Image (spheres, rainbow, N blue to C red):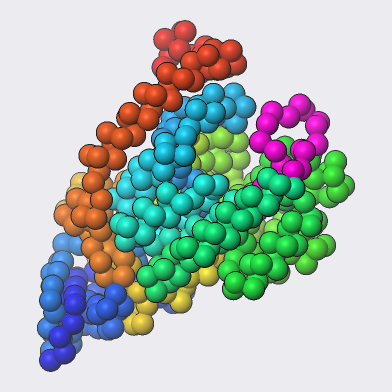
Amino acid sequence: MKKIDLLIFTKHMYTMEGEGVGYLADCGVAVDGGKIVAVASNEELKKEYTAEKTIDAPDKVLMPGFIDGHMHTGHGVLRGVAQDINSWMMEGMAPFEAQRSSEAKTCGSKLAIAETVLNGTTTIGDDGLDMDGACQFIYDIGVRGNVSVRIREALQRAYKAGELYEYDENFGKTTLNECLAIYDKYNDLDDGRIKIRFGPQGPDFVSAEMLKKVKTLARERNTKIHMHLEQGSREAKQMEMRYGMHGIPWLDSMGYLDSDFIGIHLTDATKEKVEIMASRGAGMILCSSSIGVIDGIVPPAKLFQDAGGTVGLGSDQAPGNNCHNMFNEMKLTAILNKVRYADSEVMPAWKVVRMATIENARVLGIDDAVGSIREGKDADLILIDLKQPTLAPLYMKPMRNFIPNLVYSARGHEVDTVMVKGRILVENKKAVTFHVEEILEEAQRFADDIGERAVPQFNEINGKNALYMREGKL
Ligand SMILES: [Zn+2]
């Protein structure tokens, strides 16, 4: 008998191996040193191994942890302040964003990460400026991080309609240096649990010279570029004024699109443009709920997939869609695409579960370690409690109904156990490596302070939410 760290015995497992969802009955996994050392029948595992800890889970489903490909966790502290308005950034975010300190941002990251880990997410795809606090928290609590650090040259100030962004070389250098410093401090920590990516904010926010430099530096470090792209009329206008071309054709003309490029949102991208992206091997991450709330648009996931590209899902930010929850992203991606195409077969449940697991891992370039349950991969696993009204009853004949129920019915509270590299972060639906109460108290203190200081600018802007307050609608 081999002595190992952990054995998990299940009745139902979804491995995400192969082309479908990789269902296995009466099988389990053996975990040692953070890695999956065997996937086999419960009987075989019992014959071969004894373990430090055994989880016998006949009423739970074992599957790979969810991967959230694109988040701005630091915005967690501003949850719910910028919804239902057309001018999301200038009218909604601005008065609150102006009052958000670096400490408040880190607290927002803790809140967002705690929320999504409790809902079964094992990889945090974070993005932004000032990422040290978020990276430290990711490292400390043991979750996986795929963090892109924002590089930007356009000065952060108000611009008039039709005014070209003002680039500032020093601002660009400062952000690039921060990206390099975060890379040096965190990349590949804990045997590759944290990956640092280079994040030029968008093709309109950085100069061509800077983009070329970023590409060279990223290539030298064997890391990826993560960039917002074709994300709306503001970007389109900037690109037309500066280059007479939109983001995708312009980047392609520079030879920028390849398998180390991850494009975020692509809300404006046409069929021709996504075909260019997909043909170059670049990946796409879409944020269905956030882009739905902020822009009222369904991103072109289907076009990208039809062109042979790989698509992952992200939850974006709490002042956009209000939550970080991959159940929400899977459900809305499936439903919004059905509505967009008036075709209920267009985005089935199994496909969005793959987009939240193995396909997201491929887009982020971490599929050698995570995204499916296979011998040799890291044990980033979740157990989902079947004894919940949202997942009952369970059909096994003539069809299995778990995957449709996971996407269209479950909401996240069904997640019972969450582990990353075999380390348990959540057990019996309770956080083990972080303190939810403390995070909530801290977030409330920051919100009280930010709210107080946002009053003058909020009243001066006098936008839709100020009107709703006066009319008793909030
Ligand atoms: Zn974003």
Instruction: Indicate whether 413 appears above or below 139.
Output: above
**Percent from the top left, x then y, of residue 450?**
43, 25
* Residue 42 percent across, percent down from the top left: 17, 80
Q: Position of residue 95 (x, y in %)?
A: 54, 24
The answer to whether residue 393 is left or right of residue 451 is left
Q: Main secondary structure of the magenta part?
A: loop
Q: Residue at x 53, y 17 (%)?
A: 458
Magenta-drawn segment: 152-168
Among all residues in the image, which is located at the extreme right? 244
Position of the C terminus by quadrant: top left
Query: How many labels were placed on the picture?
Result: 0
Residue 278 lies, in percent from the top left, at 67, 65
The residue located at (48%, 66%) in the rendering is: 187
Q: Is residue 161 magenta?
A: yes
257 or 456, nearer to the observer: 456
As drawn, 180 above or below 320: below
Is 128 inside the magenta-drawn segment? no
- Give the residue at the far top of this rendering: 470
Res 461 visible:
yes
| For residue 27, above or below residue 156 | below
Say if residue 340 shows up in the picture: no
Q: Quadrant of the image for the N terminus?
A: bottom left
Residue at 32% from the left image edge and 61% from the top image edge: 142
Q: Please report the residue visible at 70 percent of the width from the left and 68 percent of the height from the top.
A: 216
Left or right: 421, with 370 as reference point: left
Depth check: 189 or 64 in front? 189
Q: Quadrant of residue 379?
A: bottom left
